[in-house]
Image (spheres, rainbow, N blue to C red):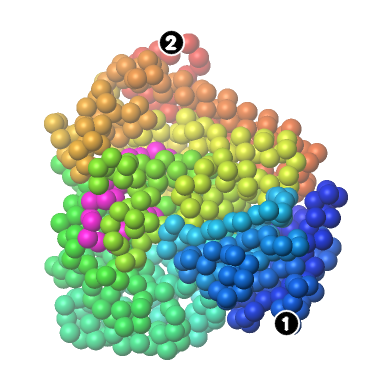
Amino acid sequence: DRGYKMWLRYNQITNQEVLEEYQSCLQHLHFSVNTATILAAVDELQAGLSSMINHSLHVLKTKDQRATLLLTIEESIAKEENVQVEIEDEGYVIKSIKNNRLIIFGKTDIGVLYGVFHLLRLMQTQCSLKHIYIVEQPKNSLRMLNEWDNMDGSIERGYAGVSIFFENNQFTKDWERVKDYARLLASVGINGIAFNNVNVHEQETKLITPEYLPTVAKVANIFRMYGIKTFLSINYASPISLGGMDTADPLNEEVRQWWKDKAKEIYRFIPDFGGVLVKADSEHRPGPFTYNRTHADGANMLAGAFAPFDGIVLWRCFVYDCMQDWRDRSTDRARAAYDHFKPIDGKFHKNVVLQIKNGPMDFQVREAVSPLFGAMPNTNQMLELQITQEYTGQQKHLCYLVPQWKEILDFDTYANGVNTPIKSIVDGSQYKYDHCGITAVSNVGNDDNWTGHTLAQANLYGYARLAWNPDLSAELITDEWAKLTFGVDEQVVQVVSNMLLQSWHIYEKYTSPLGVGWMVNPGHHYGPNVDGYEYSVWGTYHFADSKGIGVDRTVATGTGFTNQYFKENKELYETLNNCPDELLLFFHHVPYTHQLKSGDTVIQHIYNTHFEGVEEAIGLKKSWLSLEAKISPSIFNGVSERLQHQIEHAKEWRDVINTYFYRKSGIEDEKNRKIY
Ligand code: BDP
């Protein structure tokens, strides 16, 4: 057992009482429609049941009283059983009905599929099926994944092997694995995927040509069965690269026609193609700025081409100058997205969605949230998170991100007064958005266990659960995942959950302090390098000198970034007195002797947290070792090795950071610990 099955393990149920309950209630199945999705749901049920309770369901051709499990999309049948039928398209109801029977009703076959996965989850976590009445529907309409896979098989920021979609500039031959991925994603409600990297190179540019579209269609067929729409990342300059034109100017008539024809061609192969994902004018990618056009011009040109087919354009806001002069203190990368996009609120077509990273910089361990959320009431927005652990330990360190994502989703923007959290903006409940939701950069590759670190599977699971319902608590999601992955043994569930829930803070402690970010090795972003990004072109500075550290982003004396927030948050961040400790150096430049709200000085905080972080990393391994007898050896050993590596690497982080600041500041550690 190397972890391939992730959270769909369907382990044999050994608790006799539970087993008998399930066996008696799950006998005969009737389903009233025969779509590919319903058949996939039935296959999943049969496989799950035969492995969990040793028998599969007997399928009844006609509906009669023997049917102990009914799957249906027919309202008349649901009404007969007093099931609520007012639900959204992807919603479902699971209800226990008279004589120890169950009904799963969905508005669509996808709803039924989700209901079946929910039932299987209840069984895997050994919940009783008696007296249940579950009504579920997703809070977000777009619940997507972005794979950063290249056709040569490599994955940008991938830490778990190579691509499951591509190899040697062709598509994979392992279609079973693609299907297993679709099953896993559907089981937690993901409904869209863009499976090539946002950095679209020469080879991937051709994905939208007849050379590859038949195989893209094959991928789409698999995902469609599981309720997942297929999207592609496109090269903005395709009219030049593919069309032989000399411009990609969005206002040029030939360019516009080229995209219209292209959209038509794509939909000939994939009639329900989701749309395109675009990284434009960012990190050397082409875009409308080349032609002195706005991003609204650029996005709308594509939107017009895709609208006749109901396609949407996911337009990324990760736009900034990646060639800035570090000597020029007047520019601030954090300001860029808002400065570019806020002025063009309301200028985008209805089928454009702005895809906004959670923070204004780039997926740091800790950074402020992007002030763009809520600032564009007239433009569709969605949130982009990063599951792959680029800056958070690259799946060698344990860093469970659900608690971080909860903070982001719950963050009050004050856009519509008190209680306008980010989750209420991206789910479309604040402003009448036509399309919105959440997306994230995936963390899977072709490693046996998909994610390298087995415990990193929890990040993918947790992301999807939050995209379905951002109100779920981190504790509930973690408990679910631990049970699905390791079984219901209480000790295991508790130890694993505690490890996960503490891990982000532990990682934060021994890496860059107080929200300042970026103290990583340039390029690959693994391991400590305090000045690695200090004198480069990327806009990523901490400004440490002998007196102090931090980026002054205030209106009073700094870059003015704080002004991009609504009043309450501006006031929170603008003054030293109000600014929360954990973001202090993101917003302010302070002396090392500045006293934090915690009572420690900045320098003492740096020393303390770095020593504590290592101790706590050691604690993580100790906790894990206590489970040796209860975890399958290959998973146990794999995780143990990574935790050991984490400890060694945390020491390196501690020593590099502490030594650097000791040398810069000349201030001794109050506790006289060894600093090199
Ligand atoms: C950064 C990554 C880079 C991505 C970029 C993006 O370092 O590899 O291409 O974001 O999101 O986090 O476009």
| Amino acid beneath label 2 | Glu
* Residue 433 painted magenta: no
Task: Return the x and y of residue 193 as percentages of the image width and height.
Answer: 47, 67
Label 1 neighbour load within 10 Å: few <14, some 14-19, many 20+ = few
Number of numbered discs: 2
| Quadrant in which the N terminus is drawn | bottom right
Instruction: Inspect this view and state whether residue 229 appears.
Output: yes
Res 266 → quadrant = bottom left
Q: Nearer the viewer, mark 2 or mark 1?
A: 1
Task: Return the x and y of residue 149 as percentages of the image width and height.
Answer: 48, 65
| Residue ID at (19%, 76%) | 249
| Foreground pick, 657 / 492 | 492
- Whether residue 138 sits left or right of residue 51 in the image: it is left
Q: Main secondary structure of the magenta part?
A: loop
- Tell me the residue that label 1 is attached to: 62
| Foreground pick, 2 / 474 | 474
- Whether residue 310 sits left or right of residue 15 in the image: it is left
Label 2 neighbour load within 10 Å: few <14, some 14-19, many 20+ = few
Task: Return the x and y of residue 503 as percentages of the image width and height.
Answer: 54, 36
Q: What's the magenta region?
A: 365-384
| Residue ID at (17%, 84%) | 253
Residues under labels 2 and 1: Cα distance? Answer: 78 Å
Q: Mark number for residue 168?
A: none
| Amino acid beneath label 1 | Thr
| Residue ID at (40%, 46%) | 409
SS state under label 1: loop
Up the image or down, 676 lies above or below 169; here it is above
- Tell me the residue that label 2 is attached to: 670
SS state under label 2: loop
Task: Return the x and y of residue 5 as percentages of the image width and height.
Answer: 69, 59
